[in-house]
Image (spheres, rainbow, N blue to C red):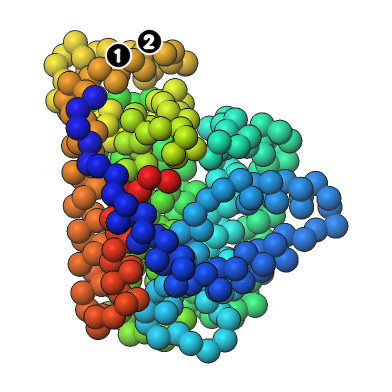
Amino acid sequence: MGSVIPLKKSANSAYMELKNLLGNKLEKVERLIELKLKSEVNLIEKMSDHHLRSGGKRLRALLTLGSAKLTGYQLGERDINLAACVELIHAATLLHDDVIDESSMRRGVKTTNSIWGNQSSILVGDYLLSRCFEIMVDDGDLEVLKLLSSTSAKIAQGEVLQLQHKGEADLLEDTYIDIINLKTAALFSAATKTGACLSGSNAKEKKALDSYGKNLGLAFQIADDALDYYGKDKFFGKEIGKDFFEGKVTLPLIIIFQKGNDEERSFLTEIMEKEKRNEDDFSEALALINKYKAIDASLKRAEYFVNVSYDSLGIFPDNEDKKILQNLTGFSLNRSF
């Protein structure tokens, strides 16, 4: 399938460095989430617990904590509260995503909707969001409240925009970037900017961390979409071909449509317009991806956003916190979990 940018131990170690640096705080985030998900309705607690314990890197929570530390936040536990808030928004969107996509597995574990049904999953997702907004109100910072509430709206808009363009083989790359900017990058940038807000950072620092998070998120999603065509289940817990079978047009398909001949474009248009795609369709799409080195090209696009993300932190003084966050940009592209 052509060469791909190799997975690097240093990328994974950057994530572990951040996690080790903030481990005590992350444990408090986990305990707060657990506390917030207590409910008199047993099924809510059961479903939310299943969903949140099914894996996940807590990357967005770590970004909130790491950005707050970088900008000098020391007193109190607002960083823990708002990191939990960011993670609850993410968890809620995944619950809703699984319903929309009719997913049966996530991270190698059965999805809540496949066990308890779509209706319950949507309502539990709404419950997570409501608990998140309680945390924001208790925090009392209007800037953070506006930032995180507007981010929730952006994520919903991204979902609708993706649905609107489902099955479009001729999807423009700019439209694809708009979708992932709303669906994924918006929450990354909100996580990092929230950290700056906690510290009372100036406008320049907030903008720098916003850019760091946004571009990190774009790189992360592009790499994730490329994994759909070459990742390994045992490493990533991701169903290979999932996006393809759901009719989602992501960057690898966009690239082969851009480079393909008339016959190949017609083939892509035909299979993406089908109600359901089969394994033969996937194999033929993979052959085109190999022919036009679409994985390499996708990761090259992601690398651009990695570099922008890395450079965004240039305004901060050189220290260990900055180094770890900059090293983390490589994790978005070269991670092996």
Q: Quadrant of residue 117?
A: top right
- What residue is rendered at 20% in x and 58% in y? 307
Dot 1 falls on a residue whose secondary structure is helix
- What residue is rendered at 41% in x and 67% in y? 18
Above or below — where is 155 with respect to 234?
A: below
Above or below — where is 237 with respect to 29?
A: above
Query: Marks 1 and 2, how far apart in space?
Result: 6 Å
Residue 52, position as x, y percentages in the image: 63, 51
Residue 204 visible somewhere in the drawing = yes
Q: Amino acid at mark 1?
A: Glu
Q: Nearer the viewer, residue 109 or 42?
A: 109
Report crowding for label 1: few under 14, some 14 to 19, many 20 or more residues within 10 A (C-alpha): some
Q: Quadrant of the N terminus?
A: top left
Dot 2 falls on a residue whose secondary structure is helix
**Relative side of 198 to 34, left or right:** left
Above or below — where is 193 with respect to 34?
A: below
Q: Nearer the viewer, residue 147 or 229?
A: 229
Q: Amino acid at mark 2?
A: Asp
Could you tell me if the residues under marks 1 and 2 are in contact, i.e. CB atoms within 8 Å?
yes
Toward the bottom, the furthest residue is 75
Residue 179 visible somewhere in the drawing = no
Report crowding for label 2: few under 14, some 14 to 19, many 20 or more residues within 10 A (C-alpha): few
Tell me the residue that label 1 is attached to.
Answer: 284
Residue 280: which disc? 2
Residue 176: which disc? none
